[in-house]
Image (tube, helix red, strand yellow):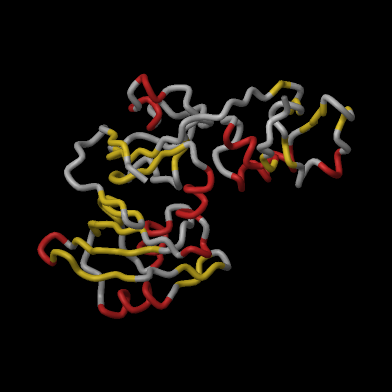
Amino acid sequence: MSSSRKIRINKFLVEAGVAASRRQAEELLETAKCKIKNAKFGNVPADKIRGYQVDPDEDKVYVNGRLVRWQEREKIYLMMNKPVGYVCTRQDPHAKKTVYDLLPSKYRGTGLFTVGRLDKDSEGLLLLTNDGDWANHLMHPRYQSEKEYLVWTKRQLSLQHLGDLKAGVKIDGKTLRMKGIKLHDQSDNIYQIILTEGHKRQIRVMIEHVGNEVVRLQRFREDQYRLGDLPPGQVREIKI
């Protein structure tokens, strides 16, 4: 019997673990050779694939000639306290340590991916899931999901710099802003920063732009989820 559930091709690729997000799936559809063969009417025309609704019982999906294996998975939601020195990607051939190495064995092979990233030199709260819809809600700019950090700088920031960082600084043609920034601990130059954007290494780049340097960066909140007392390198399931 044919499944009554049809899944848009980009979501299908995420749930199958081929892509980490729907955005990445769209990029994959642009750059990779994707073919869909339906049991009843044969090959789906190439110009119809982008918006195609996949029926897992009737369709076979191939990416770069390889059959994509799909099965409906139990949705998993995790928070991790990421230590310094680990990267958030599986594809970096130069990375010796990835956050996936920290996952307990029961989570291997479940299609987990990170909800956004923390760079190698940053630490703190990292969310992981295999639910593309949940991840998209947290990452997409339209939802303005807040991410909150403690940031140690080399020198104290002036009031002018604080104002500039909140108002926005133009870097490589883009205006980057902090939703909030305030001094957390004057003796150690620690600042509490809130972002609703997700540009690569955004805080480090912005601090460097005003002539300072980030010494340490820790994320402790993303949306409603807080790091709390979770030890470094450990994970905890989130109830949604």
Residue 203 position by quadrant: bottom left
Q: Residue at x 64, y 22 (%)?
A: 69
Examine the rendered structure and indicate whether residue 136 appears above or below residue 196: above
Quadrant of the image containing the N terminus: top right
> x and y percent of residue 194 in the render?
33, 64
Q: Is residue 125 visible?
A: yes
Q: Residue at x 24, y 71 (%)?
A: 182
Q: How many marks?
A: 0
Residue 146 position by quadrant: bottom left
Farthest left residue in view: 187
Q: Residue at x 61, y 43 (%)?
A: 24
Q: Is residue 217 visible?
A: no
> x and y percent of residue 184 in the render?
17, 65
Q: Residue at x 39, y 39 (%)?
A: 77
Residue 97 position by quadrant: top left
Examine the rendered structure and indicate whether residue 119 appears above or below residue 101: below
The answer to whether residue 33 is left or right of residue 3 is right
> x and y percent of residue 25 in the render?
64, 41
Q: Nearer the viewer, residue 221 or 90?
A: 221
Q: Nearer the viewer, residue 189 or 110?
A: 110
Farthest front residue in view: 1
